[in-house]
Image (cartoon, helix red, strand yellow):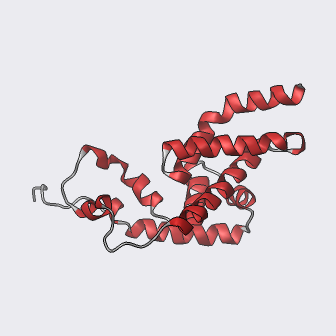
Amino acid sequence: MAEESEFNEFVAARSQALVRSAYLLTQDEGRAEDLVQTALTKAWFAWSRIDDPEAYVRRIMVTTSASWWRRRWIRESPTDEPPAQLRDSGGSEATADEGQDLWTAIGRLPRRQRAVVVLRYLEDRTETDTAQLLGCSVGTVKSQCAKALAKLRLDTALAPASDEGSVS
């Protein structure tokens, strides 16, 4: 019974933060909630053996997100034309929905780089913590982070607005 109450307290205290992190990994609210639920279910079965539940659950989230992505990737098939939302995204007219440009840019990163950026900068974790959560070396975290930041610097979603409206 003590284990069950500890687990319930953890879920109540950390669910919102876990969902936020999951959203950053999946870029979809429904999938983020599913990811957290899956991670918590997996953690429940190992609860008595877990030393650091936060790290354990986040590691499950990262690995599960990657496996979901791999499964989805296998089912995709190439088409002659990209989807409408990708074709229309090159327009110069700003809409109210375009306030999410950072999330768009992060969403374009490969899974491993996205996980590093989310853990390092959005969750403010150290390189060592990030490496432990991802099950890799600190050097891998540094290199993936450098590659991700280079891609973000070049991403058109983060490009500065044109100077059309400025007065000289």
- Please identify the quadrant where the C terminus is shown: bottom left
Relative horizontal placement of residue 118, taking residue 99 as reference (left or right): right
- Quadrant showing the N terminus: top right
Residue at x 64%, y 60% (from the top left corner)? 67
Quadrant in the picture for residue 111: bottom right
Question: Where's residue 27, x and y in %?
Answer: 48, 51
Front residue (pair 11, 70): 70
Q: Nearer the viewer, residue 17 or 125?
A: 17
Judge left or right: residue 128 versus residue 163. right
Image position of 70 with respect to 58: above or below: below
Q: Is residue 152 visible?
A: yes
Q: Position of residue 119 (x, y in %)?
A: 61, 54
Q: Residue at x 60, y 34 (%)?
A: 16
Q: Position of residue 71 (x, y in %)?
A: 60, 63
Q: Residue at x 65, y 52 (%)?
A: 125
On screen, residue 102 above or below 73: above
Residue 124 percent location from the top left of the image: 61, 49
